[in-house]
Each structure stands twice: as C-alpha cells, then as structure tokens.
Image (cartoon, rainbow, N blue to C red):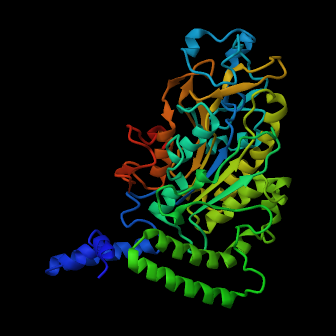
Amino acid sequence: MNPIRDHIQTLTRRHFFGRTALGLGAAALATLIEQRAGAAAATGGLPDLPHFAPKAKRAIYLFMNGGPSQMDMFDYKPAMDKLFDKDLPDSIRKGQRLTTMTSGQSRFPIAPSKYKFAQYGQSGAWVSELMPWTAKIADRLAFVKSVNTEAINHDPAVTYICTGHQLPGRASLGAWLSYGLGTENQNLPAFVVMTASWTGRKEAQAIYNRLWGSGFLPSKHQGVALRSSGDPVLFLSNPAGVDAPTRRRMLDALAKLNQKQLDDIADPETQARIAQYEMAFRMQSSVPELMDLSREPKHVMDMYGPDVHKPGTFAASCLLARRLTERGVRFVQIFHRGWDQHFNIAGDLPSQCRDVDRPCYALIRDLEQRGLLDETLVVWGGEFGRTIYCQGKLTRENYGRDHHPRCFTVWLAGGGIKSGISYGQTDDFSYNVVENPVHIHDMNATILHCLGIDHRRLTFKSQGLDMRLTGVGEHHPVKGILA
C-alpha cells in the first residue's frame, strides 16, 4: 500500500471513472473521455481544445526587444514639425510617471521624426522611409497603433507581455500554446525560440530564458532555444564514443527508472522528464535536417536578403521560422535586441530597421507563396514605445527618446487577421490613445483567439488560483482586427 499514490489517484479523472463507471451510460461516457484524451495525446494538447474552429494553426512572434520608436516608423505625426523644441504640454503628459532616464530633465522638448513618411497600398498605410520592404506588404498587415501597457522599464515590461505578469515565475505565451494545443510534429518541440543578432545599439537590454519558460506549467512546455553556433540545441549531440543504439539503450533504461518513480509518487514532472528525453532523441535527426538550408531555392534565399547566409541574423532566423512552421511547430518566437534608443536615433534606428525590414517582408511573402499565411499568425512588436519628447541633446538631425508605455504600434498578419487596416489612434503627439485602446492583455487574448482559444477558459491551477495568461481583469480579443 502506498498512501501518497492512493491519495493522488483518487483525484485523477481516469481513476474516478474507473471506480464509478457503473452501467452502460457511465461506461459510454468514460469511453468518450478516453477517446478525446487519446486524440489530444497525439499532439500533446488538452482534450477540450481548441474551444472553437481556429483561423490559425500556429504563430510566429517577431519581438523587437527594447521598444521601437512608433513615431519614427508607423505612427505618422506631421503636426510635430511645427513644434520642434517646444515643451511637451502638461495637458498631454497628464502627470505620467517617467523613468529615471528623463525624470531629472528640466525640459521635455518635442522631437519630430526626421524620417519621411508616405502612404502605401490600397489601404493607404503610413510607413516611414526606414521600412521600404515592409511598406510593400502594407495591404497584408493590420497596424494596431493603440497598444498600451503599465510597465515603464524593460525587464518588467518584457516579462509582462511575454507571460502576462510583471513579476517572474509565470508561464510564457508559447508555453501556454504548447500546453493547450501541443504540436503537429512529434519530432520537434511545440515552442521554439531564437535570439537574433543585431547591428544597432550594442548596449542592448538583457533577455532571460524565463521569457520563454513554462513557469507553473509542466517543464516540457518551455521554449527550446535554437543556437546559431555549435550544436543548434545544447546537449543534443551524443558524447564522444556513444553511438545511436547505445544512446537508445541508455534512454530505455532511464525511462524504466523514471516510470517506476512516476508509479510510486505520480509526480507529473517525472512524466515531463520522460517525454523530454524522448523528444531530444528524436530531435537528433529532425534538427540537423531543419538547419540544413542547402535545399532552399535561390529565389527564396534572395528574397530574405544577403544576411540570410549569416547564421544567427534576423534574416536567417525568419527563414528558419518558416521552416519550423511548415513542419508543424506551434509557436516560434524571435527576439531581436537593440531597440532601446535613448540618445542616437539617427545612428541606431536605421541599422535596426535594416536588420528586420526585408526579412519581415520575405517571411510574409514566403508563407503566402506556400499557402501557409492563411493558417499562420505573424505578430511584430516590442514591449512599449518611445516618447515624442527628446532625451538628451536635440537637433533636427539627431535625438533620443525615452520609454513610453501609453501607446505603441504592433502589426499582425495572417490567419484570423484582417489585412490592409490600421486600428486605433493616438493624439497628435503619439503620447495618448484617443481611439480604440488595446491593452497588452487584449493583444494576447487576440493571439489566443486566432488559434481557437478562449483566453478566459485556458487556465491552470497553481497556488490555489486558476492562472491564465491574460490575468483577472476584463480583457477581450480585438474584434476590429479579426477576419
């Protein structure tokens, strides 16, 4: 007799039906539940998901870490030209708290964008000269210009948008999708992360693997990082002197030990450990094939630009994202650092835009040409925006901008999203939202909705609470951008 195991078993659904399935009706119900559970087990997802027919099967999140300057790229504010070096009116600031970077400034002089804007496509979307390739796909994008957050500093802001909470320890968006929907490819993880190189400001903000962690969810749902040098995944290669058959025998013996521990104490993390070892064994074949770009057609490589030939660049990462997507990986997230431009917009921002502009265009076109865009959601954005007022020295040719949480721009494309629209509006200063505000919880609810998930119903019991990605407030998918 094992009292710990017996107690845990009394709490499981299968054990409950095993003891109470009396009569044909109850037996039929138990069979139905097992069938649904078996179908979910094939992908690793939950038996009751998706909640409704999804428009997208998978998602790619292009995360611009550091806070891109919305008024220099997508949120055109021509009225600011006449207010160069004028103080930001108190009626616009409205007592907003400032970061330590500019809180000590005696003035907050307005810095109009030095970059030219034009309208593109039938939608007439305003895009700056910094993003000429993105401008070509304007009619395939939905620009949301009214995204907002409460966080004013990088670490809590990035943690907030990635995990739904400003403090560490929660499950990330990709982990939630892995937990809820699983993967379509049993030889690759459901959630893959890449951290691309960048050419802008070198003193970039640090990022942490907890941004793609599983938090309170089983550890098998955490993101797997693909590296640009050495082994694509750490510890994937066999040690020297260990061949594949030997490795298989070692894993089989280890699985028996882990299974015994699972039988004794029923710890779900033991089950996760077994699954992770098996996934790693399968990845020894699938990952090298994934990383081999030699069979990609020349016209595809050319579309992504010359950087695609350099491992670890944003261009190479976008191409790998497409390859992962077509292999059924549920969620791919690419972090591109260096967008924290406090003092040198003229020097740093053009380099950052060159890194991502053409690859973003190529990714959308590549997915579209392969018939994958309609079932793949693509999201581009950062953790917050930048201020219209200057940080540091202001000239017509150069300026800096501080963090700004009250409004920033995110664009989306693909499955479940209307194309060729701009949603939300900010004031003339790109400082406050004046129409259709979109909180970051609303944005995450929208992502989940496109994948067939009601964000209010995707929960996990932890510390006595029903945890969810979008917190406890009233948040909703952004209906105005849903197809």
Q: Which quadrant holds residue 15?
A: bottom left
How many marks on residues? 0
Residue sitting at x 41%, y 39%: 475
Residue 226: x and y, percent? 70, 62
Report if residue 64 is visible in the image. yes
Residue sitting at x 81%, y 41%: 202
Give the side of residue 214 with respect to residue 225, left or right: left
Residue sitting at x 56%, y 87%: 252
Residue 40: x and y, percent? 42, 71
Residue 74: x and y, percent? 67, 32
Q: Which quadrant holds residue 420?
A: top right
Report if residue 56 is visible in the image. no
Q: Nearer the viewer, residue 467 or 49?
A: 467
Residue sitting at x 75%, y 12%: 84
Residue 392: x and y, percent? 78, 20
Q: Is residue 271 above or below residue 180?
A: below
Q: Which quadrant holds residue 156?
A: top right
